[in-house]
Image (tube, rainbow, N blue to C red):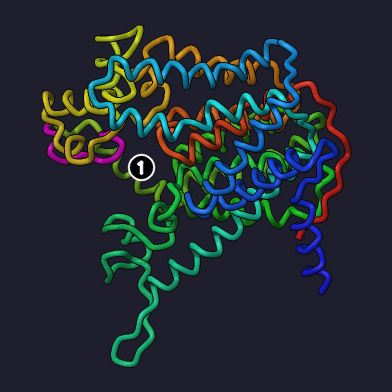
C-alpha cells in the first residue's frame, strides 16, 4: 500500500501548476506527458509535445521579454538552424524529402523560442526528468513482455524457450546468427536503441548527481540494466567517458576508491561481458581484411559512410547540398564506389555533424555546434556538464536530427539546460516510487 501511495504522489507531482496562469500550466503539463510517452513511441508523445507548442507560443506573445546574453544567443541558434534549413530548400532538387524533414524539425524552431520566454527552474526540470524516467521504466517493461512473448512457444505440448530470432541457436550463438529478442534493436523495435540509450544516460546522470534523491537508487540500477540490454556501443563509450569524469571529481581518497570500484565494475560489465560487445571485438579482427564491399560488417559500413561523407563535404563545404538532396548525393557516391551494402541500405551519414555539413555546409555546422560547445564550457553544475557531454557525443554516432525522437529531444533539452546554467539549485524533495 505504501508503494502504491508513493507512486500516486509521484505521478501527481509530475503535473505542473504555474502561478503565471492556466496557459503556462497546460504547456508544462503537456510537455511533461509528452516526455513520459517519448520512450514508448511517436504516438501519443507527438500529440502532447506538438500540442504544447501553440500554448507556449500564445504565452510567449503575451509575455514577450528577452534578456540578451551569450547563452540566450546560443538558444537562438536552433531557430536559426531551422531558417538555414528552410533556405536550403531553394537549392534542393528533391523538395518532397526536404519538406518532410523541415516539417519534422518545426519543434527546433518554436520550442527554443518558447524556452526563452518562460521561467525555468530546477523544480520544473526535475519533473521533466522524472517523467522521462517513468516512461523509460514502462518502456522497459513493455519491451521485456514482448521479447518474452516472442521467445516462448509450444511444440507438441511442450513449453520451449528460444530467444534467438532465427530459432535453434543458444543465447550466445544468437548474436552471430540473426540476433536475440532481448538485446539491441530486437528488444526495442518502436524506438531506436540509440535514442533510448541517450534518454537513459541523461536521466541516470541526473539521479547520480542529485544527492537529495535517496529513494530512487533502485531506478538507477534498472536503467543501467536497460542500457546494457539495448547494447548501444556509442552509449557504452559515452558511459565510459562519464565514469572517468565522475571518478576524477572525487574530493576524497575514500570516495575515489568507492567510485573507482564502481567504475571498474561497470566498464567490465558493459565492455567485456555484453554479448554485443564481444561480437564487435570479433568483427574488428577482420576489419581491414575486406577488399570488396559486397558485404561489410556494421563497423566497416560506418567507416565507408564516414569517408564518403567527408569526400562529399569537400565538394560543397560552405552551403552543402540542401536538406532535400543530402542523402541522395550520398547514395550517388555509394553507387560510384560500388559499395553494395550501403547502396542497399541507403545509409545517411550516421553522424549528425557530417550530416549537417552535407546538408547545410559550414554555416549550418557552426550553428549546430555553438550551443553544445557553449554548454560544455560554461557548465558548472555536474548534471548540466554530463548532459551536454551525452548530447554532444550522441551526435557523433547517429544523425539524431533527422528523426522525430532526436529532433524533439534536442529541441527541448539543449535550450532548457542552457537556461539552467547559473540558476541556483534548491533542495527539492520529490516522492518517488
Which residue sits furthest top? 318
Identify the residue at horizontal 46%, vertical 40% (top origin).
Answer: 404
Asked if residue 34 lies left or right of residue 89, the reply is right
Identify the residue at horizontal 75%, vertical 35% (top origin).
Answer: 256
Quarter residue 9 falls in: bottom right
Quarter residue 306 falls in: top left
Which residue sits furthest right? 427
Picture layout, residue 11 above or below residue 360: below
* Residue 294 part of the magenta segment: yes
Picture layout, residue 160 above or below residue 76: below
Residue 232, percent from left and from top: 45, 44
Asked if residue 343 lies left or right of residue 202, the reply is left
Residue 197, percent from left and from top: 52, 44
Q: Nearer the viewer, residue 167 or 196?
A: 196
In magenta, the rendered stretch is 292-301
Quarter the N terminus occupies = bottom right
Which residue sits furthest bottom? 157
Residue 328, percent from left and from top: 22, 27
- Where disc 1 sits, the SS reads helix
Q: Disc 1 designates what residue?
A: 281
Quarter residue 141 falls in: bottom right
Q: Nearer the viewer, residue 139 or 340?
A: 139
Q: Can residue 17 be seen?
A: yes
Q: Main secondary structure of the magenta part?
A: loop
Identify the residue at horizontal 33%, vertical 65% (top origin).
Answer: 164
Q: Can residue 273 be seen?
A: no
Label 1 neighbour load within 10 Å: few <14, some 14-19, many 20+: few
Amino acid at each position: 500500500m505504501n508503494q502504491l501511495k508513493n507512486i500516486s504522489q509521484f505521478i501527481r507531482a509530475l503535473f505542473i501548476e504555474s502561478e503565471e496562469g492556466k496557459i503556462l500550466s497546460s504547456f508544462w503539463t503537456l510537455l511533461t506527458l509528452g516526455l513520459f510517452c517519448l520512450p514508448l513511441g511517436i504516438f501519443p508523445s507527438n500529440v502532447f509535445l506538438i500540442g504544447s507548442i501553440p500554448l507556449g507560443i500564445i504565452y510567449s506573445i503575451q509575455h514577450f521579454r528577452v534578456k540578451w546574453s551569450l547563452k540566450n544567443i546560443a538558444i537562438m541558434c536552433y531557430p536559426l538552424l531551422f531558417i538555414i534549413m528552410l533556405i536550403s530548400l531553394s537549392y534542393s532538387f528533391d523538395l518532397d524529402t526536404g519538406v518532410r524533414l523541415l516539417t519534422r524539425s518545426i519543434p527546433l524552431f518554436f520550442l527554443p523560442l518558447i524556452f526563452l520566454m518562460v521561467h525555468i527552474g530546477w523544480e520544473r526540470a526535475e519533473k521533466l526528468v522524472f517523467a522521462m524516467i517513468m516512461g523509460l521504466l514502462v518502456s522497459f517493461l513493455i519491451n521485456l513482455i514482448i521479447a518474452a512473448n516472442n521467445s516462448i512457444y509450444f511444440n507438441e505440448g511442450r513449453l520451449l524457450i528460444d530467444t534467438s530470432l532465427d530459432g535453434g541457436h543458444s543465447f550466445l550463438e544468437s548474436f552471430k546468427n540473426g540476433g536475440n529478442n532481448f538485446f539491441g534493436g530486437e528488444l526495442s523495435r518502436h524506438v531506436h536503441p540509440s535514442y533510448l540509450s541517450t534518454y537513459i544516460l541523461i536521466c541516470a546522470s541526473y539521479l547520480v548527481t542529485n544527492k537529495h534523491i535517496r529513494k530512487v537508487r533502485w531506478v538507477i540500477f534498472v536503467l543501467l540494466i536497460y542500457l546494457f540490454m539495448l547494447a548501444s556501443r556509442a552509449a557504452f563509450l559515452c558511459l565510459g567517458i562519464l565514469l572517468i569524469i565522475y571518478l576524477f571529481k572525487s574530493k576524497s581518497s575514500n570516495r575515489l576508491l568507492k567510485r573507482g570500484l564502481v567504475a571498474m565494475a561497470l566498464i567490465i560489465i558493459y565492455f567485456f561481458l555484453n554479448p554485443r560487445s564481444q561480437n564487435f571485438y570479433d568483427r574488428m579482427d577482420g576489419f581491414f581484411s575486406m577488399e570488396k564491399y559486397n558485404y561489410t560488417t556494421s563497423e566497416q559500413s560506418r567507416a565507408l559512410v564516414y569517408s564518403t561523407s567527408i569526400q562529399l563535404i569537400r565538394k560543397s563545404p560552405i552551403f552543402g547540398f540542401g536538406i532535400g538532396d543530402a542523402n541522395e548525393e550520398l547514395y550517388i557516391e555509394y553507387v560510384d564506389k560500388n559499395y553494395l551494402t550501403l547502396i542497399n541500405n541507403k545509409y545517411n551519414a550516421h553522424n549528425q555533424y557530417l550530416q549537417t555539413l552535407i546538408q547545410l555546409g559550414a554555416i549550418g555546422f557552426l550553428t549546430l555546434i555553438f550551443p553544445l560547445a557553449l554548454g560544455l564550457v560554461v557548465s558548472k553544475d555536474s548534471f548540466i556538464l554530463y548532459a551536454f557531454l551525452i548530447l554532444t557525443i550522441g551526435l557523433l554516432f547517429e544523425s539524431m536530427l533527422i528523426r522525430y525522437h532526436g529532433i524533439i529531444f534536442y529541441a527541448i533539452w539543449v535550450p532548457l539546460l542552457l537556461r539552467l546554467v547559473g540558476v541556483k539549485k534548491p533542495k527539492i524533495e520529490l516522492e518517488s516510487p
